[in-house]
Image (cartoon, rainbow, N blue to C red):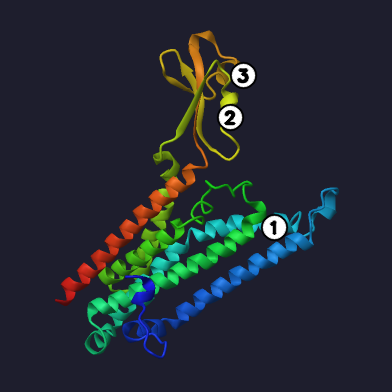
Amino acid sequence: MSASATLRRSSGGRLRGPYWTTVRLHRAILWGALGLVIAAAVVAVALRVSAVVIPEQTDCVGACTDTFLGFDSARAFLGITADYAATALLFLPFLVGAVVAGPVIARELESGTHRLAWTQSASPARWLAAKLTVAAVATTALVLALVGSYQFLRAPVAGTYNQRWVDRGVFEAYGPVLIAYCLLAVAIGALAGLVVRRTLPAMAIAGVVSLSMILAVGSVRWDVFPVRTITGSGTGRMDGTMAIGRDSFLMQSGYVTASGDRLPYNACWQRTRDFDSCPADLNITGWYVDFHPHTHFWWVTFAETAIMLALAAAAAWAAFRLLRRRTV
């Protein structure tokens, strides 16, 4: 069933039942999310406009380089802001998980107000389904809006240092990956809230677990996915690193010996202070370069998204299972 179908409306166009109750109960959080979206959009537009109105001065030195808030130019400030924005996006699962675990789930269980909803307007399963649905829809909208502002902001500096497709935050902000992580955070938050049933501890647990997931996977992402390898004869290792293209991600490079063993890229340098002048006793016959071409981006994106959505479904199933066991 789609999210739009799940969020059922009455003939007057208003949400009804536990969905309406959930939206009304947590309207302050929803308004806060809207405020965050507006602020991000305003900053993105302001910096893009500033980068056009206040262009870089390439023919000056000294004091005249301080042209925009202490930076060389508005474009330089935009680039720094884009770097911080990419990092900030990685903390969205932490925020989502903490909010769902605490204010949305655990607070009602801790205060006992959930009993009123269960006895008067909704069964426990419908109560949890409403909260998960509203949280998932709101989270998806929030992520899409923030990612849109970020992509608009970073467009002038895309591909520069810290803004390559493999960089942390930049990778997550393309495609559906960040949405999948945030939906996983929704499910983790619901499960943590039901298990702990105390607001602050549930927020801490869900936030830390959600953040740990996106950081841990990001640290091994490119090591786990199979690399593409090119090889050549002789000791011209630099020829290989140039051949992979600027848009590729270099993982490892070095030399190959007559026995087929690999030596690190600096094996010759340590002996001769020349990368491509190698001692005969090393028995080097060629070189290799391991890298990820840009085409690997979408393969990794869809694989990672599928895994996170599967984990989100498992966590949501566990939450419903736990709720059922405690209410039977």
Earlier-in-chain disc, 2 versus 1:
1
- Give the residue number, with chain letter if any, for mark 3: 273
What amino acid does circle 3 point to? Arg
Residue 240 locus on image (x, y percent): 56, 26
Residue 182 locus on image (x, y percent): 41, 63
Q: What number is the disc on residue 245?
A: none
Q: Residue at x 47, y 61 (%)?
A: 91
Whether residue 99 is situated above or below residue 289 in the rendered picture: below
Quadrant of the image occupied by residue 116: bottom left
Locate residue 319 relative to residue 135 in the image: left or right: left
Q: What number is the disc on residue 243?
A: 2
Q: Residue at x 51, y 38 (%)?
A: 293
Q: What number is the disc on residue 77?
A: 1
Residue 9 locus on image (x, y percent): 37, 84
What amino acid does circle 1 point to? Phe
Q: Nearer the viewer, residue 297 or 69?
A: 297
Earlier-in-chain disc, 1 versus 3:
1
Give the CA separation, mark 2 to mark 1: 33 Å
